[in-house]
Image (spheres, grey):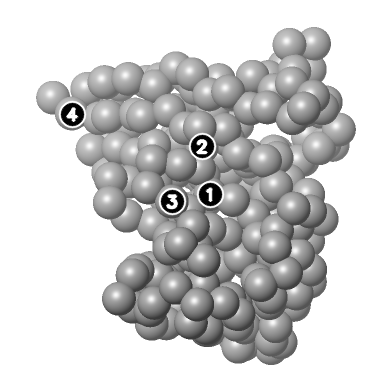
Amino acid sequence: EIVLTQSPGTLSLSPGERATLSCRASQSVSSSYLAWYQQKPGQAPRLLIYGASSRTTGIPDRFSGSGSGTDFTLTISRLEPEDFAVYYCQHYGGSLFTFGPGTKVDIK
Amino acid sequence: EVQLVESGGGLVQPGGSLRLSCSASGFTVSSNYMTWVRQAPGKGLEWVSVIYSGGSTYYADSVKGRFTISRHDSKNTLYLQMNSLRPEDTAVYFCARGQAGRSFDYWGQGTLVTVSS
């Protein structure tokens, strides 16, 4: 069973700054099946990135995904006030789906 | 417009049962793979179960043998039958539609299940 680890647990940044979020898998995984979600309090998750680097329709281009093997990254180039939220990575493999524990991006 | 609306949550005693429903509009449930994901209070997301268009189903180890995912094609609705409920099953349960890359593009607003005596 693949375990996803996200770091840091919390990222404190100011609007306009760059955010770099990490998702590490316990073993090499297919980048085709790595996704990123944003969740705000009281709301359902929102799909940002799938296939490690493909942005979902309607997601601003300040969000980008990269990585392969065991290490994946979500980058927010310039934080907007609405970007402060919790971010989860998710993987599919062996008929099972797995979420990482999340990274909270909060206002410094 | 794609919409997913969950219902059926509530308070149930340990050992009890509950059936969640997820009514879909704007697309055909049977033509997509659909999933249930839950979130315990203050915790992260946990995948629960998936049903594919061909009818294959899979479950997380934590619910295997107790939960059953199904769908009613003519009602365009997804279900999650939950039996032998435990306090650790307390969570908001979301249904979601699967898309490319084994990711989930549309989500419902969630329904709260509380297992407590």
User: Mark 2 or 1, which is nearer the eye?
Assistant: 1
Q: Which mark is residue A71?
A: none
Q: Residue A39: give x, y in percent of width and height.
A: 48, 53
Q: Name the residue under label 3.
A: A40
Identify the residue at image location x=81%, y=37%. Answer: B32
User: Mark 4 or 2, which is nearer the eye?
Assistant: 2
Which amino acid type is marked by label 3?
Lys
Q: Which of disc 2 and disc 4 is earlier in sequence? A: 2
Q: Tell whether label 1 touches label 2 (CB within 8 Å).
A: yes
Q: Mark 4 points at which residue?
A: B116
| Quadrant in the picture for residue B50 | top right
The residue lying toward the viewer, choosing from B64 and A50, is A50
Q: Residue B76: give x, y in percent of width and height.
A: 75, 18
Secondary structure under the numbered disc 3 in the rendered image: loop
Q: Distance between the residues labelled 2 and 3?
A: 14 Å
Secondary structure under the numbered disc 2 in the rendered image: strand
Both marks 2 and 1 on one chain: no
Identify the residue at image location x=53%, y=24%. Answer: B6
Horizontally, residue B20 falls left or right of residue B9, namely right
Q: Which mark is residue B94?
A: 2
User: Mark 2 or 3, which is nearer the eye?
Assistant: 3
Horizontally, residue A97 falls left or right of residue B110, namely right
Q: Tell whether label 1 touches label 4 (CB within 8 Å).
A: no
